[in-house]
Image (cartoon, grey):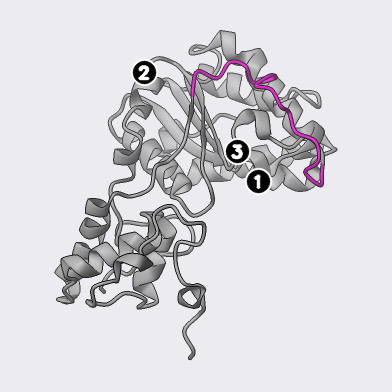
Amino acid sequence: MPRWFNTAGPCQPDIHYMLSPLARLPELERLIEQRSYFVIHAPRQTGKTTLMLALAQSLTARGHYTAVMLSVEMGAVFSDQPGKAEKAILGAWRSAAQHRLPPELHPPQWPKAEDGQRISAALATWARASSHPLVILIDEIDALQGNALLSLLRQLRDGYPNRPDAFPHALALVGLRDVRDYKVASGGGERLNTASPFNIKVKSLTLRNFSQAEVAELYQQHTDETGQVFTPEAIAHAYCLSQGQPWFSVKLKSQNCINNTPMKPDKCLPQRRSPMPISCLKDNPG
């Protein structure tokens, strides 16, 4: 079965055309070696989850780390009930870890703990039990708000001095915003406006867009499998419209919004707010 261009959710290399996710943030492995806690933030549909899954798989496969991407999204409906949020999150974490890690690296039974301490207790127990340094990549961090978010951040900060033997060796918070912009109240009116209570972060990183050469490489994968050729003018056209934003770059091709007709120079507006015609985003009829 031929691969296709994915515009919904994380990419999977066996069914989707995709570039190497790790090439977009090559410094991540260095941060992990340094036992860093860091933040990755970028808009939706830019490849954050795809990158985290690939990074965790790569680190674990080499046998040096127990690395896994986990999400806190299941706790989002309990923003003002940290205890319930913790239980929902830990249930989702166990399920994800059992799916993504080999059996010998699965987490142990979560220990009993009081509200506001369950996340730190679980991570400490897992780090002690793991045969390799534990690397946790927490996706959808800003799905949490209110007391549930503050409690999670404070538990991570409290356990941080105990790494790597009794807390994760390295950890990333992944979402739409940097720490200071995390919402602490529903409705979005109130934000942290400070790195505290996660002032242990070493660095905040964001994902760059594709270069024109990378857009060409992505489309070449389609050419190799289908025989459809894109001229240099068509590639330039696609890059002009998308500015290399990953979702737009893929959507253009999946919706057949590009062709081999050169684009007029006055239509190419770098960094414009609307990077492509809205008609190209509509579902094809039928």
Rendered residue at 58%/15% (across/down): 200
Q: Which residue is mark 3?
A: 177
Relative to 242, say whether 262 is above or below.
below
Task: Point out the tag, 1 or 3, that comes first from the N-terminus.
Answer: 1
Tell me the SS state at disc 3: loop
Graded by Cα atoms within 10 Å as few (under 14), some (14 to 19) or many (20 or more), the crowding at tag 3 reads many
Judge depth for marks 1 and 3 and give the one in front.
Answer: 3
The three-letter amino acid code for the residue at tag 1 is: Glu
**Could one spot residue 217 in this view of the protein?**
yes
Task: Point out the tag, 1 or 2, that comes first from the N-terminus.
Answer: 2
Chief SS of the magenta region: loop
User: Residue 73 bears which disc, if any?
Assistant: 1
Question: Decide: marks 2, 3 in contact (CB < 8 A)?
Answer: no
Q: Which residue is mark 2?
A: 33
Q: Nearer the viewer, residue 76 or 47?
A: 47
Rendered residue at 38%/70% (across/down): 252
Rendered residue at 71%/40% (across/down): 144
Judge depth for marks 2 and 3 and give the one in front.
Answer: 3
User: Residue 81 bears which disc, if any?
Assistant: none
How far apart in space, not on screen, are marks 1 and 2 (Cα)?
Answer: 27 Å
Tell me the SS state at disc 2: helix
Q: Nearer the viewer, residue 59 or 255?
A: 255
Task: Place residue 236 in its image quadrant.
Answer: bottom left
Relative to 33, say whether 3 is above or below.
below
Instruction: Measuring from the top left, give residue 118's x and y in whole percent.
Output: 72, 26
Instruction: Measuring from the top left, give residue 24's x and y in whole percent.
Output: 33, 40
Task: Point out the tag, 2 or 3, that comes first from the N-terminus.
Answer: 2
> In this picture, which residue range is highlighted in magenta?
186-203
Q: Nearer the viewer, residue 237 or 44?
A: 237
The three-letter amino acid code for the residue at tag 2 is: Glu
The three-letter amino acid code for the residue at tag 3 is: Arg
